[in-house]
Image (tube, rainbow, N blue to C red):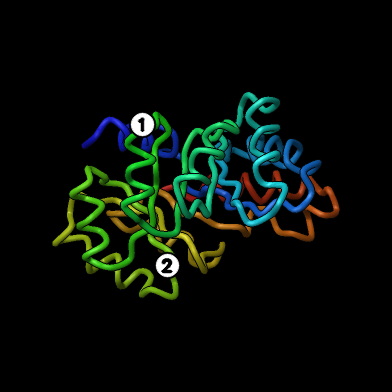
Amino acid sequence: MTSKTEKLLSLLDGQPVIPVLKIANVADAVPLARALARGGLPAIEITLRTASALEAIRQVAAEVEEAIVGAGTILDAAQFEKAAAAGSRFIVSPGITRELLSAADDSNVPLLPGAITPSEIMAAREAGLRFLKFFPAEQSGGIASLKAFASPLADVKFCPTGGISGKNAADYLALSNVICIGGSWVAPDELVKAGKWDEIEALARAASTLRK
């Protein structure tokens, strides 16, 4: 296992749910990160799906010492570099490309790339990666697919994301090749917009108890 995979596992292992966040208002970033950390989910993924994302990452990295902030929806090397410069401690991508692998090779920030087919998983494995995002999980066979990968790809572990909620989270976490899961249900848009940080903290606390 490569040192970068080990670094990524050290950041995320032990936290069953990684909140996947789309932050429209940068002013929400710091109180949201604090609420999630208080609830037992310090590692968060802020997706580059809004104009506020990079600034949100910067503010959380600078102001929320207890948070482990990562960047998601990274599609190319330029985004990788901007996210790393903003303070991201890990990078998440929905897929895997040579350009992203090259950017990761040149950086100390570990990459969690997405892979859903045996060929994609094997390509990542050849690149030295043993911990991958399985996205979109539910639309790509979900639990059945991950069970099928467990034997032929026994040394590869996953963080499934996409279509996962409080209703099926425990079923995913029960799989031998799943380290953690990604989900947005712990920080619903309506609670974020209303600034209901105590309610988000409670959702995070419930999610943090979803251990194997």
Answer with mark 1 or mark 2, whichever residue precedes in sequence.
1
| Left or right: residue 204 compared with residue 144 | right
Q: Nearer the viewer, residue 209 or 130?
A: 130
Would you call the spot at circle 1 few (<14 residues within 10 Å), some (14-19), or many (20 or more)? some
Callouts 1 and 2 close, C-beta under 8 Å: no
| Left or right: residue 182 compared with residue 7 | right
Label 1, secondary structure: give it.
helix
Please state the horizontal and vertical placement of residue 155, each as a whole percent of the image: 19, 49
Q: Which mark is residue 103?
A: none
Would you call the spot at circle 2 few (<14 residues within 10 Å), some (14-19), or many (20 or more)? many
Q: Amino acid at mark 1?
A: Lys
Image quarter of the N terminus: top left
> At 66% across and 33% down in the image, what residue appears?
58
Q: Nearer the viewer, residue 145 or 47?
A: 47
> At 54% across and 67% down in the image, what residue appears?
167
| Left or right: residue 205 compared with residue 137 | right
Please state the horizontal and vertical placement of residue 198, each as a whole percent of the image: 78, 44
For this orientation, the residue located farthest to the left is 152
Is residue 111 shown above or below 152? above
Is residue 186 shown above or below 6? below
Please state the horizontal and vertical placement of residue 99, each as a whole percent of the image: 36, 49
Q: Amino acid at mark 2?
A: Ala
Mark 1–mark 2 distance (CA, rounded to whole Å): 24 Å
> At 82% across and 49% down in the image, what residue appears?
196
> At 70% across and 26% down in the image, what residue appears?
63
* Residue 104 sits in quarter: top left
Label 2, secondary structure: give it.
loop
Please state the horizontal and vertical placement of residue 69, each as a whole percent of the image: 57, 36
Q: Which mark is residue 7?
A: 1
| Left or right: residue 37 compared with residue 25 | left
Q: Which residue is denoted by mark 2 in the rendering?
A: 137
